Image (cartoon, rainbow, N blue to C red):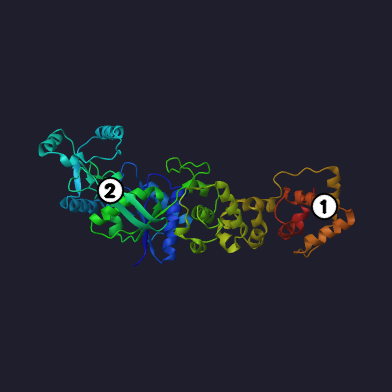
Amino acid sequence: MTVTVRFAPSPTGRIHIGNARTALFNWLFALNNKGRFIQRFDDTDVARSTQEFSDAILYDLHWLGIFPDATEYQSRRFEIYDAAVERLKAARLVYACYETPEELDLRRKVRRTRGLPPVYGREALTLTRDQVAEYQSDGRRPHWRFLLPNFTSDPLQPERTEIHWNDLVRGEETVDLASVSDPVVRREDGTYLYTLPSVVDDIEMGISHVIRGDDHVTNTGVQIALFQALGAEPPVFGHHNLLTTSTGEGLSKRTGALSIERLRETGIEPMAVASLAVLVGTSENVVAVPDMNGLAERFDPAATSKSAAKFDPDELFVLNRTLLHNMPFSEARDRLIVLGISGEQAEPFWLAVRGNVDRLADAAIWWRTLREGPQEPPEFSDEDRDFLHQAFDLLPEDPWNGSVWKNWTGKIREATGRKGKALFMPLRLALTGQNSGPELADLLPLLGREGTLARRP
């Protein structure tokens, strides 16, 4: 069996880190099993779904390092869903309902007052032909519900019927269908809700594993029943824990909380996002993994906790710094060129400054400092100014190589008696305008003798 997975968001907003967690779980599972990854847009909500959001989601996935084998749109597959509904009608497994939303709400309230679960009572199954004709004469059009297999010979007297499956993440799972309403599969206007298109597409596209958030556990019980009703073997299901904000709040596409777009604009590396999104809330240590293959080696769906995991953006910055501090020049080169950093000095420059950047774009600040000097001339005490005049008088002659800093500071120490911070700090401020930063031994060869003399206060 070829492993085939899918990531199926609704294109009604930008995806956030929680959505990315699901996409990454599927992508890594496919990588580990030499399988296929299908990007499927569940865009049956034609009023809210847009091509703009679909394109943006694909861009976010590509940025993360996810490249689908195929892209599908449910809005282009209505004929397939219509055919499935007709099959279910013929088998008497879907039925027409004429209640308005207000009537349904009232019935739910009545059931609650009677101590009953607020599920649909299947009243539509007892409608007479005359009642149906009356509804139709009033202009009502039916919505259609799937008849869950949880009843005896009397459909109004449900018995306890359970759906069981071995969850890829959670182990043995059970859903009691008696506690669930028969799901609406098609609206009055002929458009579809989530359940039926998802199952039909999983069958048609040969989806072998469905990996998604644990907020879908109950849906899975319903969907397994629908797979069986359509004569198909259900896929293997896996439900991972959800991510929340650091304060425990749920994530939402509508609010833009921790959206991939915002994280990218903040300057976070994609593998920092991927590492934290995948490893948080698992038995694995959260570390900065430099590439997707390395992350795949650490990925194990069964290692995921059953409780929600808090996503702390501060951890992202820690991982981001780790990735940048160890990033080889070959990986950074093209992005540095975009920042205007190129030429023979580009590689030694990157190796010198990478340990002092929080975001790759910070390298441009150090490049400008080396080229143009400190943005604001530092202020020195009279004593430090006299020290610097003496120090610059001792600047070694060419050749200007990696040992120049050691030679220069040795002469300064011998001539002035200064050492430690009293020696290094005035020199750092004069050369960079900053009281911390890359090793001056690495910066001096980049400055050159003339560039260094130009920093003399």
Q: Secondary structure at mark 1?
A: helix
Q: Which residue is mark 2?
A: 160
Between label 1 and label 2, give the one nearer the viewer: 2
Viewer-closest of 131 and 56: 131
Asked if residue 32 shows in the view, the reply is yes
Quadrant where the image shows the N terminus: bottom left
Q: Position of residue 419 (x, y in %)?
A: 84, 54
Upstream in sequence: badge 1 or badge 2? 2
Asked if residue 74 shows in the view, the reply is no
Give the residue type at disc 1. Leu
Q: Residue at x 78, y 60 (%)?
A: 405
Position above or below: 126 against 21: above
Quadrant of the rendered image containing residue 348: bottom right
Judged left or right of residue 20, residue 232 is left
Judged left or right of residue 396, residue 293 is left
Viewer-closest of 32 and 126: 126
Q: Residue at x 13, y 36 (%)?
A: 131
Q: Position of residue 267 (x, y in %)?
A: 55, 50
Give the residue type at disc 2. Arg
Judged left or right of residue 297, residue 106 is left
The Cα atoms of the two marked residues, 1 and 2, are separated by: 81 Å
User: How many numbered discs sit on the rendered protein?
Assistant: 2
Position above or below: 105 against 333: above
Q: Which residue is mark 1?
A: 423
Q: Determine crowd level at label 1: few under 14, some 14-19, many 20+ residues with C-alpha closer than 10 A.
A: some
Q: Position of residue 192 (x, y in %)?
A: 27, 46
